[in-house]
Amino acid sequence: MTRKADRDQIRRQNRSIVLQALRRNGPMARIDLGQMTRLSPATVTAITSDLLDQGLILSLESEEPKTPQARGRPRTLLKLNPDAVYTVGVRLSVNNIDMSLVNFSGEVTREKRTHFDSASADAASFPKTLTDAIRLFLQEAGIGPSRVREIGVAAQGVVETETGVVAWSPAFAGRKIPVVKPLQSAFGAECYISNDTNMITEALHWSDPNRYSGTFAVIMLDYGVGMGLYLNNQLFAGASGTAAEFGHANHIPGGALCRCGKKGCLEAYLSDYALVRAASHLPENTDPISIEAGVSGLARLIELASSGDENALKAFHEAGRVLGYGLARVIAMIDPKRLVLTGAAMRAFSFMEKGMWEGLEEALVADLRNNFSLDVMPWNEDFIRSGLIAQSMERLDKDFLGNATPASSRVSRTDSSEIPA
């Protein structure tokens, strides 16, 4: 049984390698697929034959120009069948549901933003709001639910991937918002949910696996403060799926009031409302809900700092020191080879940078401070959608069998560690 399981795993992995090569590089001949994937010609032939039978790839004649030196028929190229299956990517944020329809080539064919009232959304009301929004989205796209294989959801806040629940998020008035079960019941599709910063981490790994691999961390400073972790080449979510809640780790016991209701969280010193609160000299126990922050509030604060306003400059500098202390803990615990800072607040990084390095120097010995690289990336909301797509395509490549007979019912050869899919 163990040997058969190992063979199945290798078969699925080889299949995924071929599909990813076609998705990244477009139509290719079998010989080119073999050279790119380093799989043997026999393995490539077996895999692609199955994929053709399953309707997951298509064959087409090469359009290479004919020359007097060319002999024989044009080469046959293989390409993904974009209409083989669809997935839906959903991002949940304050007052917004962002939806993307994605084909099997990983291309976004349609997108839409629907608004809802975060101030009243709770476990009783939101599941219907979400399912109704997705149902209308598919109707407008002319795609029947039966053609949707998977729905992937990314949400702000504390997300329990194992239970499919948003435990807490600034996007909702209530807690323990069920997402996965209502969607599975409504559409009969596989459904997955993750923290939005995890999806940024996944997107970076997909876009540049040479740079973003092994062990690295992504910290997003925005409406809240989030973290995504890649540990030993695997996205890390923890036992219940709620890791890594960097923003809600305590910085100062009994300190500033956080939006989650606790006091002293890192978010209470680093998020948009925390920066506005500090620059305005509001008491640390001022309720974040009452603070006018968000995109416009942060933009105003950046303008003030740019013009030399001392209160704004001090708020950013002190936030940088807090960030440095937080990063020191991450470095000491997991020894990442790279740290990535992103989010809307990175527009103000020049005002935070000096404080950040001061905090790191105070909190961490020099030997540990010299072991990582730092990337500061401009914020791009497409990171989250790209991460959802990358995860979804990876699952489909290994598991989706299209129109063919299930692989378990076919006879296969197993004569080496390189097993045809």
Image (spheres, rainbow, N blue to C red):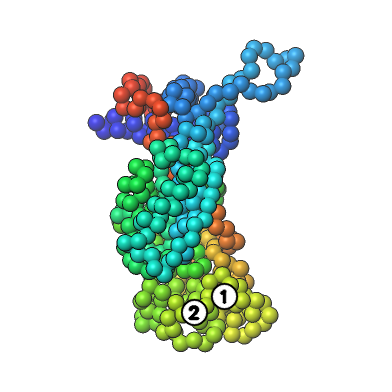
Camera-nearest residue between 138 and 29 = 138
Task: Say which mark, if any, is on residue 416.
Answer: none
Amino acid type, callout 1: Gly
Residue highlighted by disc 2:
291
- SS at mark 1? helix
The percent coordinates of residue 22 (x first, y second) are 54, 33
Q: Residue sitting at 40 percent across and 57 percent down?
A: 129
Residue highlighted by disc 1:
297
- SS at mark 2? loop
**Quadrant location of the N terminus?**
top left
Which mark is first along the chain, 1 or 2? 2
Q: Residue sitting at 43 percent across and 48 percent down?
A: 135
- Above-or-below relation of 408 to 223: above
- Above-or-below relation of 281 to 258: below
Q: Residue sitting at 53 percent across and 75 percent down?
A: 293
User: In the shown orientation, is residue 308 left or right of residue 23?
Assistant: right
Q: Residue sitting at 49 percent across and 69 percent down?
A: 223
**Residue 279 is drawn in which quadrant?**
bottom right
Is the residue under label 1 in contact with that under label 2 (CB below 8 Å)?
yes
Camera-nearest residue between 264 and 104 = 104
> Which residue in the rendered view is the most extreme toward the right?
68
The percent coordinates of residue 277 (x first, y second) are 50, 82
Asked whether the viewer can see residue 131, the reply is yes
**Residue 268 is drawn in which quadrant?**
bottom left
Amino acid type, callout 2: Ile
